[in-house]
Each structure stands twice: as C-alpha cells, then as structure tokens.
Amino acid sequence: MLVLILLGAQYHQLRILVILGNSEGINLDKDREALEKLISPEVYIEFLDEPKRTEISDSLWQQNWDMLFFSGHSSSEGGQGRIFINRTDSLTIDELKYGLRKAIRHGLQLAVFNSCDGLGLAEDLADLNLPQVIFMREPIIDQVAQSFLKIFLERFSQGESLYLSVRHTREQLIENDYDEKFPGSCWLPVIFQNPTVVPPDWKKLKGFPKPSNPYRALFSFREEDSEYFFGRENFVTKLQNIVEKQNFAMVLGASGSGKSSLVNAGLVPKLREQWTIVQFRPWDNPFYQLASALAPFIYPKELKTVDKKFVEELAKNLYEGKKDLFEIIKSIDVNSNLLLIVDQFEELYTSNSTEVQNRFIGQLLQVVNADSQSNTYENLPQFTLLITLRVDFYGKVLANALFNEILNDYSEIKLGPMAETDLKDAIEKPAKKQGVEIETGLTDRILQDLGAAPGNLSLLEFALDKLWDSMSDGVIGHKDYEAIGGVEKAIGQYADDFYNVESREQTNLRRIMVQLVRPGEGTDDVRQVATRSQVGEDNWRLAVRLAGERLVVIGQNEDKQDTVELVHEALIRHWPLLRKWMNEDRDILRKKHKIETAAREWKVCRYTKVF
C-alpha cells in the first residue's frame, strides 16, 4: 500500500485529493474509511479511483490542493521510485515532476509513503525540493500499514506535530502488539526532512501558507539559494577575479564564517555559464571522493550510469600514482574553463593518514603546476583549483613544502567578520524578498547581541531560521526573538529542548554526539562522520530523530553505508552540554582517535584493497 500526501494551504477550507490506485492484494477500503472521517465543513475530499495518468496530471495542474493521498502499490527499482495507479499503468515521480513542481510552488510541504519499499519515491521527491517525506524503508504488512494511517491521521488532525504524530503512532502500534506479530514493522516509518523547513501542523494547513524560509540555519547556502545570499558581494567579486586570473585560490576563514556559502551561493552561480565545475569534500577517503566527482566527465559516453568499480579503480590508480590528475583533467572534453573545488579541505587532515595527505596534495598541486606550464602540457583546459580551509588548519598547509611554495605565488581570500551594513543586508534583504517585515529596532538588537566574532554567522543564520518559524502575520517581532533565547542561546536552547524531551535516551544521545566530534590536537574540536555500524543499530533510531530535528545530517558513503554527522560545528562551540561532555571524555576520545589513526596508517599499506 502507498500513501502520498502533498500539502500546501491556499484556502481556509482544507482541500484533499485522494487517488486510489491498483488495489490487487490490498484493501484500500480501509484507507477510504480513515480519510472519509476527516470530511467536515472545513475539509473537502475528492476521490479518484484507479485513474489514468492524465487525470492525475490535470488535477495537479488545474486545481490547488492542500493534500494529495495516493494509495496503492509502490516499488523502488534501481533507486527509482514507482507508483502503480491502476491495473495496467505505473508512474515514476519524474513522469509527474512538472505537476508536482507546480504544487510545490503553491505550498506543497509533506509526503507520506505508507508503502513497501518507498525509499526511491522519497529520494525522487526530495530531489524536487519537497520539504517533508514520511516513508516505509522496507516491505510492510497491509494490516500494519492500515493501522498506521488510521492512527497517524487521528493524531495529526487533532493538532499533534508531525514528528510527535509519527512517534506516538509507532508507540501505539507497539502497545497493540503489532511489533510482536510482525517484528520491526512499527519502526519502518522514517521522516525524510528538508532541515530548512519546519513541518506544518494541521491548524496551519487551513490558513494561508508562510512564504518559503530564505534562511539556512546551520546549513551553508547552496547554489540554488543564491537569490537569498546577501552581505558578501565584495568578496564574491574579488574571488571571481582571482579564480579567473589564477590557477589556484584559497578561501580561508574561521568555522562559521561562511566559506562554503561564499563559494556555492556567491561564486558558482556567476561562473556556471562559462566554467565546468567539479566539486567534492575530502571526508576520510579523498581519492575516492575526487574520482567520484571526475567520473561523470570521463566515463564512456555510451554507458548511462557510472559504475562503482570504475570509480574505485580510478581512485586506486590516483593514489598509487599510476594515473596523474593532470592527465585526467587534460582528457576531459569540455568547451569551457574547469574549476575544481575542494570544500572543507581541513577534513583531509582530520580524517586521513599523513601518507594519504601527502599523496593527495601532490596530485592536486601537480595540476596547478602543469597549468602554469601550459607549453609543456598542451590541450590542458584553463584550470583553477579552489579550496576552502578553516584558519586553524592553515599551519598544516604551510607545513607542506609544495603547498608553501604555491601559496607564495597566489592570492587568497581571508573571510573575517562582516561589516555592520553587510550584516543588515544578510538579515533584512532575504525577509524583504519574501514580503516579510522585521519589527523596528530588532535588527539592531540582533547585531548588538551577535558581536564581531568571525564564526558567528552560523549563530545568526540559526537564529533567523528560528525567528522565521516563530513569526505570525508576516512580521518577525521582538517577542519572537525573546522566545528563542536570542542569538547566543538559540542553538543551545534548541538542542537542550530535544535532550530534555528524549529523557529515556539521554545516555545514548550523549554517546552519539561525542562520537561525532573529534577532539582537536592544537586546533579546535571538529565534527567527524560516523557510520551506522559505528553508532550502533540500537542507537540508529535516535540518530534518525536527531536528523528530524536538524541537529545532525544523515547520508551515505561510497559503500552505501548510512552515515551521520553534526549539522555544523557551531553546535560544538555553542551547546554548553556538548562542550561539557567533550571536556569530560576528552582523554578517552583522544586515545580512540590515536587508535583510529594507527588503523588508517596500517590501511594505507594495504591501500589496493581499500577501494
């Protein structure tokens, strides 16, 4: 069974479109009964039974719906989600993308897949920037799916938040012995959430929607956020000039100073038409990440998707020196300049052995040197290497002789505190663009509390994001600012609230959070990635809930293992409880780090088997 909900309030009456698809082997009457109970003068529902594709498309294009339910069969084959709309026809999300995008523009916010194998559907909808998705990761018994939908709708329509509705539904299913009859089924619903958007409650769905949130909380600005990126215009212009004239550039700044945002939302949109852009983060496997970023440009064109073995072999050859990066760059068939961006370069030092660091730097700088000797290496496209680096790791860069020599010949961007006028732009212009007013005097109050520390931009963005959630009637006010605890306390207060709610899980929450922080050795503490197995299966559900609250980010590594990391290092600096845990566990964590480093050094000796 599949249930897809698309939310977007345009009227005071809640309008719901229900599509009942292929019902072979499942009982969709139970879905209809649960939904019909919602009908009232305030809620209008229209049902489509086993419709054709054109009927669904017409409904999405011609009317505005607050919710859309799709009940039927679904699958995820080859990573692509598919829904079965009648006895003979099926659809992918891609085949409905234009109608769905229209719905998203009109306020669509939530998708719920009460279905078997819904991960592909959730990922496809996330690619369309649908903010909230609830789905079943694995096959689920029809009886459990029906009960989940019934209980969830009852709780959600009675005013519970989306997160609590799902959580309490799971708990009620367990109390009803479903987990005994069908082990693990009660934990299959997973929230797949855009961390920049707060899930709506039932009451808000019946009012006019807020404009989309232009602030990024603890996340860096992306290329698609460029229209809301203000305050660094002079640095963007300066960086663009450097990149266009030099074959090496560095953006240097404190954690939270906006290095990644400057590159992604400032520089990249200005270069997109004239440059081919290749970008990655080193993580704990920089050669694999580099190979993954390059593979789409050098993989045989007759093959549609890049094979993992191809990436692994390329990474292995780059590490061993059997292939030189400048030869690969030279082979790329592009009619434009080539910009290679290595974001968060400090990860090379925090997560990799000295041997890997030196070999990786050697490959990167070989291309920079080759480009400066263009007469020697013909047909090399105009190439620029751009890295972003935390300032407290600058000494490690200088300790490398090759890097030291390069840095003497090239300019760099140093991001310090933003000027007051630029900070005002960063606060006020995104809100103005969305038609939202900031109460008189509030901007000055925020700036006074913010101070001049270069890493405080993350605090500012987080506070603005929470203010956006709290505002009403299109006005961000002083009362909203007081409610979030101001700039300095907003992050800590938010994290403490989650910690206090999870009273039964506080010990496990501590274990997860300290595992995601690497204690500094002559530098500040930094975040690090942990795999699902490292966190532990017993703790993974808690990690998922942390992701739902935008405190961590869940992803996957090259081996398709689930991973988790802190959303931003600002949590390390500004959540007092996490700082306390780190100080108490620092000696143990440093010993653990030394063991992990020794293991990586040993791994290097067997590197051909790593990929």
Image: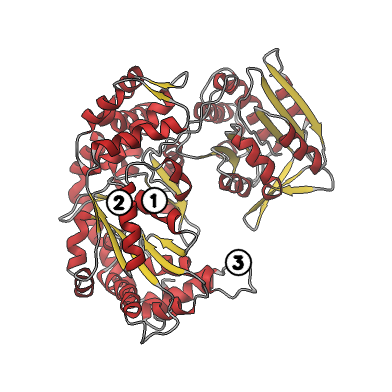
Q: Alpha-carbon distance for marks 2 and 1? A: 9 Å
Residue 256, placed above or below residue 42: below
Q: Earlier in the sequence, mark 2 or mark 1?
A: 2
Find numbered disc 2 in the image and state the secondary structure of the residue it sits on. Answer: helix
- Image position, residue 284 (x, y; %): 35, 62
Which sits in the foreground, 462 or 357?
462
Query: Is 589 placed left or right of 326 in the picture?
Result: left
Q: Alpha-carbon distance for marks 1 and 3? A: 30 Å
Which quadrant of the figure contains the C terminus?
Answer: bottom left
Amino acid carrying label 1: it is Gly
**Pointers 2 and 1 in contact (C-beta within 8 Å):** yes
Which residue is under mark 3?
305
In the rendered image, is residue 502 in sight? no
Which residue is under mark 2?
235
**Pointers 3 and 2 in contact (C-beta within 8 Å):** no
Q: Quadrant of residue 390?
A: bottom left
Which quadrant of the figure contains the N terminus?
Answer: top right
**Pointers 1 and 3 in contact (C-beta within 8 Å):** no
Amino acid carrying label 2: it is Phe
- Image position, residue 99 (x, y; %): 69, 41
Name of the residue lying farthest toward the top: 41
Q: Residues within 10 Å of mark 2 (few under 14, many from 20)?
A: some
Find numbered disc 3 in the image and state the secondary structure of the residue it sits on. Answer: loop
Which residue is under mark 1?
266
- Image position, residue 554 (x, y; %): 45, 47
